[in-house]
Amino acid sequence: MRFIVMIFAAAVAAGLNLVTAPLHAEAAIPSYQLTVTESASAITTDQSTPSFRASLVPPAGDPSLNPANFYISIGSMNEAGGLNTLSPPYNLYFGGLPPFSLTAGTYDVVAKYQSPNYGLLTSAPVTLTVSQATPTLTCNGGGNYTYAPGAPITIGVDGVGSGAFTAHFAGPENLTSSVQQLDSNHQFTVSAPTVPGNYSPSCEFQGSATYAPASAPFNNRVLTVSASHPVGGIRLYTNPAPLVPNTPTTWQVDVIGQPGLPAPTGNVSITIGNYFIRPLLILGPGGTATVQLTSPNATAADGIQVVYMGDTVYADSFVHLYTTQPIPGRTASGATPSASSPTVAAPAAAAAGQSVVSDRPSPSAGPDNSPLPLAGVAGLSAVSRIGRTSPRNLAVVLLIAIAAIALGATGFVGVRWWKGSILSRTQRK
């Protein structure tokens, strides 16, 4: 029995030695100081991290400080910073990480010192909270032109470099696209609504580890989905005509609709050579737009492009011209014609899908520059028609006709006289 008690006492003593040994080792580390502070405790991902300062008074007996042994840890990243002195107390400064170095989350920041005599020493932590930034989105899409129902729309995005997006269209049909990833050009493509009408479009960012979800309207606030009927034609008139460079000019554009459909509405642009006429012309009643602007330093010979940008009924179209004609009801200089100017009947209405084209002039108009039917094909040039007949030309035609009649009558009388003379001579013989 005594033997068992002795063995038990020896075991207890050994256990006490095992427990107290680490305590004696810990207590053997001489006094030291190791702390860390930060200039801010919360940032967003698009901000630089705050600056940090670590202070160290190493344990007695450590050799001179090796700078590589003293650093700041932000999460799993170790930053050396810069020492302000080579004798204790040592202060280590780190100015912070650039924006987007950290994703959203909470990070422990500590100072660390690798003691040659006592191993790795770590300070009490400070906490840095990083929140998602809210991106400033710009969505570039839509443009000034129309889209056919279900046509592809490519949207460019500024404000984030990657991520998932949708597009939303609010209008006759409320439509949200499927989720699409930005490509290497910072673009994504969706389908237009299938119901014609005007829509308010926006792009919607789904969020990431760096950015919070966000949305923004398209830079073109209205997107038009068109039934895409072809227009009947596009006409351009100017006063003066032909164009005179750098001269105050009245411009008139007529966009011809189709039978049974409303008159075209929307915007028209005019480009002459390398000059773009501003502002855009806005079609009024009957599909006509008129504006007074100084002509650029160019002529019609440089080429004129008239672009109709479409509406919910008609598809966008354009036409190339190399001449302009006076505005109907005015002369080339802009004056109203005299009452003696002849008039003719207007051309008959064209069949569905065709513009009105005639070899005769419009009433009280200069030469007609009606374009050929576009029928949805862009780039057809307008063709000039025969101008109206003036009173002087009509008088000339009448004089020629009277002279011809007089000459005919004289010839007829001469022939009868010649035949009678011959017959009389024969009878006398």
Image (cartoon, rainbow, N blue to C red):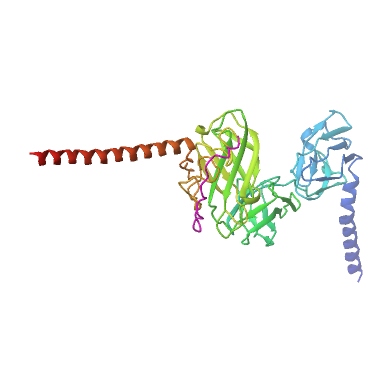
Give the residue at the far front of this rendering.
428
- Residue 149 in the image: state x and y as whole percent: 59, 59
Give the residue at the far left of this rendering.
429
* Residue 144 visible in the displayed image: no
- Residue 205 in the image: state x and y as whole percent: 71, 53
Question: Image quadrant of residue 292?
Answer: top right
Question: Image quadrant of residue 194?
Answer: bottom right
Q: Nearer the viewer, residue 262 or 327?
A: 327
Does 296 appear above or below 220?
Answer: above
Q: Nearer the viewer, residue 168 or 346?
A: 346
Is 16 contained in the magenta span?
no
Question: Image quadrant of residue 396?
Answer: top left
Numbered disc total: 0
- Which residues are drawn in magenta? 335-354
- Left/right placement of residue 20 relative to residue 181 reads right
Q: Nearer the viewer, residue 258 or 426?
A: 426
Quadrant occupied by the N terminus: bottom right
- Residue 249 in the image: state x and y as whole percent: 62, 33
* Residue 259 visible in the displayed image: yes
Determine the residue positioned at 68% across, 56% down: 199
Determine the residue positioned at 58% across, 41% down: 329
Determine the residue positioned at 60% across, 41% down: 252
- Left/right placement of residue 65 relative to residue 149 reads right
- Residue 241 in the image: state x and y as whole percent: 55, 34
Q: Main secondary structure of the magenta part?
A: loop
Give the residue at the far bottom of this rendering.
1
Determine the residue positioned at 83% across, 32% down: 63
Quadrant occupied by the C terminus: top left
